[in-house]
Image (tube, rainbow, N blue to C red):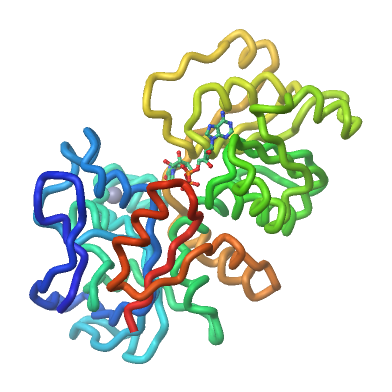
Amino acid sequence: MKALVKSRACPGIWLEDVPEPQPGINDVLIKVRRTAICGTDLHIYNWDAWAQKTIPVPMVVGHEFVGEIVEVGSNVNDFRPGQIVSGEGHVVCGRCRNCMAGRRHLCSQTSGIGVDRPGAFAEYLALPMSNVWEHRPGIDLDVAALFDPFGNAVHTALQYDLLGEDVLITGAGPIGAMAAAVCRHAGARHVVITDVIDSRLERAAQLGATRTVNVSRETLAEVQAELGMEEGFDIGLEMSGNPQAFNDMLANLCHGGKVAILGIPSENTAIDWNRVIFNMLTLKGIYGREMYETWYKMSVMIESGLDISPVITHRLPFTEFQHGFDVMRSGEASKVVLNWD
Ligand code: NAD
Ligand code: ZN
């Protein structure tokens, strides 16, 4: 079958012929129909320090996908050929304390598809049945391909009660923009989002942000005054990985403000701990999504009218993957969906 492979220890990803995966007795075999490119795939493409220490080569990459089940292993009773599914990309151990307690997203022994086990940028993917999520009938396939990053947005946004709250999102990448949509859907009042790129802010506004802020031109203090906010934001969602953005956020929260941190900083970030203590802030780190409460929330929010499709800027056949990676690397694209039909 055709697959996008990290086959050499240098920058690039290559379209190659590899053997079709053989599903085990607990696996389903999925014919991949759409995939989306993630920031993680760019790290692997660029072969940066993280990728060099994490990715064994050769490796079929990719973890954002939707496809159709074509075969199930002999132990699999709950799935059947023809179902449209995505999958949780974190494969957990099932035996640690957290897994045994049903807190699978907290497993310390995860492996990742397209990272340290074969990925989804391929015509076929074999996945343990415990990682399969069936979509509701009629789901748009391009949207279904985004459930992995959409899940990051939902899991982060829903850490705290949003109804009536004023939310600050730092970073209007695809995940920040989708989080803005979720916050509005969940009943927040002001959803203010920051970035340094105007096109990203415009897209976030399309998805539901009520006020966009280009922090290279405006300060959050000015925006708070304009909105008549006296005590600061109630909730912060850090989705930029930028240390300056994180510090700006902490400076603009109310006393008792709550922060969920998804963005991954590339360096150690210094923050003002006195601010955390005397303003009585709550900081919570977020990784991945909840299995499978986040997936349930995603499916029902889409069913009840949440539209995240404006985050898709490019739709390409998989053979044009190089163009997809190029527009992602240039910062021009938000989500790029590759079609494998
Ligand atoms: P992205 O890189 O596309 O978006 C980040 C955005 O932050 C960009 O639009 C960038 O212009 C903006 N930015 C840069 N400096 C800024 C500043 N000073 N103020 C405000 N915005 C600024 O990334 P994404 O795919 O949307 O993901 C968001 C973040 O979440 C990234 O850091 C990513 O690595 C991280 N992530 C974490 C997990 C997890 O499980 N914890 C999963 C996926 C992604
Ligand atoms: Zn575990």
Identify whether 237 is placed above or below 31. above
The residue sitting at 88% across, 24% down in the picture is 230
- Horizontal relation, residue 135 to residue 339: left or right: right
Task: Examine the image and state in which quarter residue 113 appears.
Answer: bottom left
Please provide percent x and percent y for residue 273: 56, 11
Q: Report the quarter where the N terminus lies.
A: bottom left
Identify whether 94 is placed above or below 142. above
Towards the viewer: 177 or 202: 202
Please provide percent x and percent y for residue 91: 28, 58
Q: Report the quarter where the C terminus lies.
A: bottom left
Residue 158 visible within the image = no
- Horizontal relation, residue 62 to residue 189: left or right: left
Looking at the image, which residue sits at the far top?
274
The residue sitting at 73% across, 27% down in the picture is 218
The residue sitting at 33% across, 67% down in the picture is 131
Looking at the image, which residue sits at the far right?
228
All told, the count of numbered labels is 0
Identify whether 96 is placed above or below 260. below
- Horizontal relation, residue 282 to residue 50: left or right: right
Please provide percent x and percent y for residue 80: 33, 89
Please provide percent x and percent y for residue 237: 61, 38
Towards the viewer: 334 or 131: 334
Towards the viewer: 262 or 170: 170
Task: Examine the image and state in which quarter residue 119 appears.
Answer: bottom left
Residue 2 visible within the image = yes
